[in-house]
Amino acid sequence: MDEAPAGMTQVLGGTRVDLDGSSVKENMLSVQGEAPRKCYQDLARSFGDIYDEFNTLAEQLASEEGNGGELAKLKAALPKLVAVQASNAARAHALGEFASTYVCTTEKSDFSEQLQLLTATALRRPDIGNDPHGAVQKFENAVAQGRATKEGRRGGGGGGGEDEDADLVITQAGGGGGGGYEPPNAKCPISGIAVGEIETPVEDEKGYIYEKLTIEEYINGHTRRTRETAVDCPQIGTTHRVSIASLNSATRLLRSRKVAAAAKKRARDESDDDDNIEISQ
């Protein structure tokens, strides 16, 4: 921007600033741009919880008879949700790109048009506009899990439900405490939290366990800079790559916890029965 006469000022967003290129740019792109950037960031963080609820509902519907219509409606709504997430990510990226590339000038600038162009460009990035988080695949996985549960219920002849499922896991794993399942890593390689203490565990294609939010932030942080969709596994000694799409709920770990809890409950119940027998005798 051509320099204005010394001492001239301009009120921008309720703040009086010196009317020179550097001051105008700093105020418009940093101060005034902070609110929309924070809004986009807050919305981006909420999508993880939204997808979790979405897939939980899909699995539940798929696991019960007579829900084909509702499941179809849910599936039809998924592309719209993915598009909203991509649009939000593209706008956030466009703001950052605009802030780093804009040059002040005395010529009239159409900020809206420039941001629209940057947003459209961002949507063509594979880490933004091509379902980089694997929402569609995770939805299909949830539906498949629900259908498997339904088929298992049909084939079980109305058997023992959760206890029967727990016994099956114990048998397959060879017995032992905690359901017998042992993941290849003892703790999340990023957060350092022990696998058994992770509240929301996810696993990659090789079975390594991570804290969901931590691994997603790790992948997004690296792919945002490299424009790739996958990163090297953060677990020392591994050679495979990990992407958001390759992550799934750590069902074996969660089931092993259920097995361990069921085993403890049975042990307590048997202990209580023994105590009652001794008292009656």
Image (tube, rainbow, N blue to C red):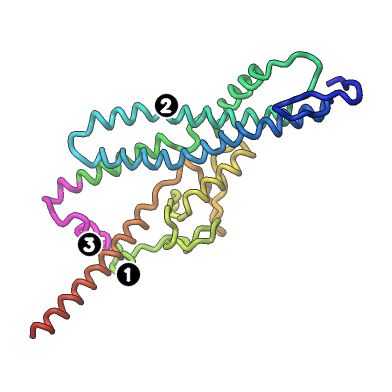
Secondary element type, mark 2: helix
How far, Cα to Cα, is label 2 from label 3?
41 Å
Q: Which comes sooner in the sequence, label 3 or label 1?
A: 3
The region drawn magenta spans 152-172
- Residue at image position (55%, 32%) is 89
Query: Percent x, y for residue 201?
Result: 43, 53
Q: Nearer the viewer, residue 128 or 264?
A: 264
> Does residue 226 lie above or below 258 as drawn?
above
Q: Which mark is residue 80?
A: 2
Residue 182 occupies quadrant? bottom left
From the viewer's perspective, tell me whether residue 158 is left or right of residue 184. left
Query: Percent x, y for residue 164?
Result: 19, 58
Query: Percent x, y for residue 172?
Result: 27, 61
Outermost residue on the right side: it is: 6
Q: Label 1, on which residue?
A: 177
Kind of residue at disc 3 = Asp
Outermost residue on the top side: it is: 108
How far, Cα to Cα, is label 3 from label 1?
12 Å
Residue 57 occupies quadrant? top left
- On whether residue 154 falls in the magenta region, the answer is yes
Query: Percent x, y for residue 211?
Result: 48, 53
Residue 271 occupies quadrant? bottom left
How far, Cα to Cα, is label 1 from label 2?
44 Å
- Residue at image position (20%, 44%) is 151
Kind of residue at disc 2 = Lys
Secondary element type, mark 1: helix
From the viewer's perspective, tell me whether residue 216 is left or right of residue 19. left
Say which quadrant the N terminus sits in.
Answer: top right
